Image (spheres, coloured by chain):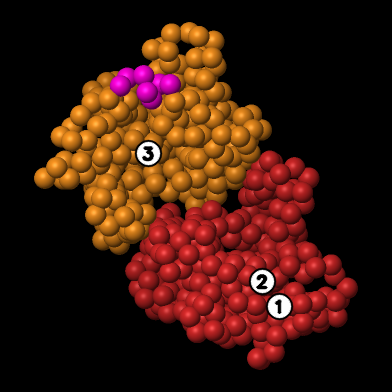
Amino acid sequence: MAEFVTVLVDGIFYSAWLFVAAVGLTLIYGVMKIVNLTHGSFYALGAYAGASFTGAWIAHGYPPMLSYAVLLAAAIIITLVFAPLIERGILRFMYAKEEVVILLITYSLFLILEDVIKLIWGVDPYFVSEPYGLLGSFDVGEMTYPTYNLILVGIAIVSGSGLTLLLQGTRIGKLLRTVIHDPEVSRAMGINVDRFYLVTFTFGSMLAAIGGAFTAPTVSVVPGLGVEIIVLSFAVVVIGGLGSLPGAALGAVIVGLVRSATIHYVPALELFVIYFVMAMVLAFRPRGLFSLAEPRKI
Amino acid sequence: MSNITPRDRTLPMLGAVLLAVIVLGPLLPKWALFLLTIAIAKGMVSLGLMLQLRAGLVSFGQALYYCIGGYTAGSLGRFFDISDMLLQMICGASAAAFVALILGFLLARYRGIFYGLLSMALSMILYGLLAKSESLGSTDGINILPSTIFGIRPVQEWVRYVVLVTGCSVAALAAALVQRYLKTPLGQLSPAIKDNEIRVEYMGASARKAIHVKYVIAAALSGIGGALAATAVGHIDPDMAYWTTSGEFIFITILAGTRSVAAPFLGAILFETIRTVAFDISPNTWQMTLGISLLLVIVFLPEGLWSLFSRRKAA
């Protein structure tokens, strides 16, 4: 029983992290139909910005309790620098191309950003563990967990429910759903589709960067950080259905729980199991668990 | 459409290149022999990707079969003491083709990004298994026995040359066979599938079967490539199946284009050269160089570098 609780708690923490890392990918695909490999780059950018900004903040002796705000600000600032540049500078000229070609374009951008990161921050690892240790810990049964883990759960809940409310409950959300349904007609109706694309791309990338920034204190930030995130977020997003918000949440929970269970019971299958679930879902429900029948447009 | 040039000079060209490698090989420095061998190995995989790309399919998991080829070669040495290069390549190709035959029933139903995503998931499954399997060296991988051919072990001085010539001969043969295949009705279906699958079905052909066949051929080619790379490097590890490896292959295929069976090899040589030179000049920006080249090719030469050589046809 105690072990089951451990699996569950680990799984929830892992799911929350996965959701924050992956939800931007599904948002961008849902609105713009772009399979965006630069998502991993933004995760890495967020992690580097978070680690270096927070490191500097603490080194200056400013109140460490505010380092959480610095992490958030770092992620937001770094995305505002890079995301509009990529969307306005390159991607917007490519929207007419096939999905697969756009995928390849984001792949080349991913390669470029990998080295941009190395040029800015060098190749030495960054550590900022202060925000991680600051909050102390709490007990569940016999296990002790760092309270810091709850922050990501909080971010996951806020971003997930915030996005849902925005999409379903506001005027902007309604316009956005129109753009998703038919960008051409929306444009004809006077909706500024370009602006929606810009904002969506920036906001989706920002979520990845926030995920990266808040992960930074728990790991050493090294080159290549974003590479693994890309496949992981694809697994999460594909399981739930590309472009679906509740799908991303479900995918994160499934992958999170399955992984934490395998780590506890059959550690050798840890990596295998994630992609096995992804392949199974693709094999039986290619459009994901949360997909609806797609109306065919002529 | 993307038919090969009117009077087909592909076969004499392949022969000439092979001859050139055999004659000029001994004059080349060792690093160039190695670079060429790896390029040939990767070119084989890209040749397989090209077959799929001609039908409009991009596999983000071709590394699966590259890795199967490599590990088949490695296991032959480790468990059965077999170090013959040709035998390793044949077994690598067979193992890869067998797996593809089974997975093909599933994958041939997919198009667009779902084809890419499912093939990526499949290759990551293999990565996950290999990275945790102790008997095959986990993430460190294993070393390969020194290569022999027809039971003879070449002297140290000549190993690189022998491996290159063997690889080149196999590649030339494979390219010639693929060329033959492209001329068959089944092979000529590819551009039609890309253009309009419904029309293909109305003609009475099965797009799914054609894709399945391509998928198996592509896997066999990648298996040979994997075995060759394993022999040349002398080491295999699970990264051979990681998605970034598949990305490299796609890179080569897009760079080269789909107009000739020789294009993937040219693309691979170019890729390895860019990478080696860029890495030498500035180790921290070689990926950026690759990324920018890929972006430029996609935007300005959507049919690949080969389109610079072949005559442009009226659309």
| Residue bearing mark 2 | B232
Colour of chain B, in one word, is red
Residue A143, x across and y down, in percent: 22, 35
**Residue A118 at what x, y percent from top left?**
63, 35
Secondary element under disc 3, as helix, strand or loop, is helix
Residue B31 seen: yes
Prevailing SS of the magenta stretch = helix
Task: Determine the secondary structure under disc 2.
Answer: helix
State which chain disc 3 sits on.
Answer: A
Q: Which residue is mark 1?
A: B163
The boundaries of the magenta stretch are A130-136
Residue type for callout 1: Val
Give the total of numbered labels: 3
Determine whether label 1 and label 2 are within 8 Å by CB: yes
User: Chain in orange?
Assistant: A
Q: Is residue A152 left or right of residue B150?
A: left
Q: Secondary structure at mark 1?
A: helix
Residue B156 image offset from top left, x and y in percent: 76, 77
Residue at (43% x, 16% y) in the render:
A67
Chain containing the residue with disc 2: B
Left or right? Give the position of A62 relative to A27: right
- In this rendering, the answer to whether B164 lies above or below B31 is below
Determine which residue is flagged by label 3.
A22
Tell me where residue A124 sits by quadrant: top right
Which mark's residue is nearer the viewer, 3 or 2?
2
Q: Amino acid at mark 2?
A: Ala
Q: Residue at x 74, y 54 (%)?
A: B276
Q: Residue at x 42, y 79 (%)?
A: B98
Q: Amino acid at mark 3?
A: Ala
* Residue A248 badge: none
Viewer-closest of A206 and A290: A206
